[in-house]
Amino acid sequence: MTSSHLIILNTSLVTLSRCALFYACYHYLLRTVFHDLQALASSAAGPDADSDIELESLPAPNTSREGPLLSQGSNKQGASKHSKIAHISFSLCFSESCTLFLLFMCQELNILDPGSRLLNWRISLFILLAMILFAIPLSQNFLLTYQSPLGRVSRSRSVPTRVLMALIPYSLYIFALSLIPLPEGLSSTSLISAALLRLIVLGTLIIGLLSGLGAARNAWDFTPWLSKNQRRVPSEQELLAAEEALERIRNDVQVRRKEERRLQESKSDDTSSWMSRVASTITGSSELTSIQREIAGLLALEYQMDRNLENLKSLHANSRYNRTLQGRVFQWVGRIFALYCVFRTLSSILNILAPYHARHSLNNDPHPRSSYPDLIAHLLTYMFSLLPFIHLGDESISVISRQVGLILVGVIILSSVRFVLRAVSRSLRITSQNLGASLLLLILAQLMGIYLISTLVQLRTAFPPVLDSASASSNVFSTLPAYEVFGAAFDYSYLLSAFATGAYLWIDERINGTGSKIDDN
C-alpha cells in the first residue's frame, strides 16, 4: 500500500472517530451539561427568569397575556436556533479536543502513519483555532444582541443592526489579541502560527487566573480559621424569614415595574393637545424617573439579600451533609486539597523569587525546565514509586510529577469554573434561561479549547520531540512551542488571582458579613 493510500485510510479512520465523538457529545453529554447550565442561568437571573421569553415582556400578575403570547412562538423558534448554535460549537470543540489527545496517544503507542497523524493533528488544531478565534466569539456577540424588548412585545433587532453590534466588539477582541507580545525566542512565519502563539499566551494567563481563583476559594472554604468569626449554622426559622423578606422585595419590584410600564404606555398613547402633552411630559418624566430610581434601589437590595440567602442555604445544606459519613470524608479530602493549594502557591512564589536557580537548572537538566516542580505532585509521585511493583528512576519521577501537577491544576480550575460562569451570568443579567445557558455553553467551549491547547504545550515538556531525529518533522509536538517560555506568565497570573480573590473574600466577609457569624438576635 502506497503512502498516499495509507494517509487516506488513516484520515478516514480519524474522521470517523471525530464524527463519533461529535455525535456522543451532542446527543448524550450535552443533555446533562446544558441542563446544569440552565439551572445555573436560572438561579443567577432570579425566580422570574423564563426559558424562552424575556423578562421585560412578561405580564404582571392578574393582567392580560396578549402581548407576550404574540412573541412566544418566535421566541421559542429563536431559542431553538441559538441553542443549536451553542450545542454544535461545544460538540465540535469537544470532538476536536479529544481527537488531539487521541493523536497524541497514537504517537506514543506508534499507531497510524506519522504523516497521517501530523496531517490530522494540523486539521484538528486549525478547526479548534477557528472555533476559539472566530466562530465562538461571533456567536457570543450575536446571542448578546439577540433581542431588544420594546414595550410589551419583544421584537427582534434587524439583521444589519445585529451584524454591526456583533462585529464591533469582535474587531476589538481581535485587535486586543494582536497586541499580545510574542515570547522572546519565538518567531512566527505565518498568520496561523502567530495566532496560535498569542492564544497560548492568553490561555496560560486564563489558566493561571482560574487556578488562583480556585486555590483561594478552596483554601477559604475548607479552613474556617481564616475567617474572623466561626460560622454558625442558620436555623430553619432564619431561612424562612430570609426567604419571606426576599419575596417581599421581589413583589415590590414587580409592582414598580408594572407602574413603570403604565407610565411609558400612557406617554406613547397620549392624543391630547400640545400644551397638555408638554405639561404631562414634565410631570410624567419626573414620576417615571422616581419609579426607575426606586427600582434600581430595590434591585440592589434584592441582589444583596439574594446573596445572603444563598449563603445561609449553603451553610445549612453543608452542615447537614457534613454530618454524614460521605460528608466527613469530603471535608477531609477538601482540607488536604486546600493544603495542596497552599503549597502550589508557594511553588509559584519560588518560581518568581528565584529565577537564577531556574536558569541554572536549564544548563544541567537533560529535560530543561524554567520553574520548580510541584512539591505535592513530586511527593505523591515519589511515594508511588516506593511501591514494590513500581520501578521509576529520578528522571521518570520528574516527568510524571509534572503530569500529576497538571492534573491537580485541572482539578483546581474545575472547582472555579462554576463560580466564574455564575458570575458571568449575573453580570450580563440575561433573563432568558435558554439564552443564558447557550451563552454559558459557548464560554465553556472556549475555555475548554484554550485549556486543551495550553495543556498540550505543557505535555510537550514530558514528551519533547527529538530535534536530531529524522522523524522530528512528523512529531505532532513539533507544531507547538516549549512551555518554558510561558511558565512565568502562569505564575504571575496565578499569584495575582489568588491574592486578589483572598483579599476580596476577606473584605466581603467583614463588610457584608457573607459567611461570617450570624447574630443571635
Image (cartoon, helix red, strand yellow):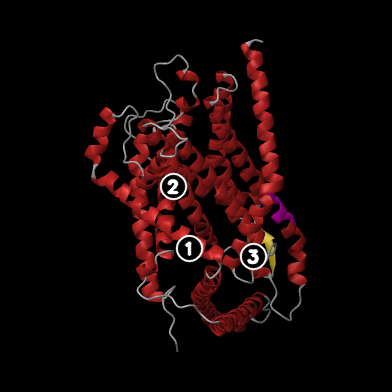
In what element is the residue under mark 3? strand
From where the camera sits, is residue 94 visible? yes
Q: Residue furthest bottom?
A: 521
The residue wearing badge 3 is 149
Q: Earlier in the sequence, mark 1 or mark 2?
A: 2
Q: Earlier in the sequence, mark 3 or mark 2?
A: 3
Quarter of the image where one finds residue 55: bottom right
Residue 225 vertical position relative to residue 266 in the rendered view, above or below:
above
Residue 400 vertical position relative to residue 298 in the rendered view, above or below:
above
Task: Residue 226 in the image: state x and y as whole percent.
Answer: 35, 67
Residue in the image at 35% along x and 59% along y: 500
In what element is the residue under mark 1? helix
The residue wearing badge 2 is 207
Task: Residue 3 in the image: state x and y as whole percent.
Answer: 62, 12
- The chief SS type of the magenta part is helix
* Residue 490 inside the magenta-drawn segment: no
Cα gap from disc 3 to disc 1, whole angstroms: 47 Å
Quarter of the image where one finds residue 472: top left
Mark 1, other Cα within 10 Å: few <14 / some 14–19 / many ≥20? some
Cα gap from disc 1 to disc 2, whole angstroms: 26 Å
Residue 496 vertical position relative to residue 293 in the rendered view, above or below:
above
Task: Residue 510 in the image: state x and y as whole percent.
Answer: 36, 74
Residue in the image at 59% along x and 23% along y: 111
Cα gap from disc 3 to disc 2, whole angstroms: 37 Å
Disc number placed over residue 436 in the picture, else none: none
Residue range highlighted in magenta: 77-84
Disc number placed over residue 331 in the picture, else none: 1
Mark 3, other Cα within 10 Å: few <14 / some 14–19 / many ≥20? some
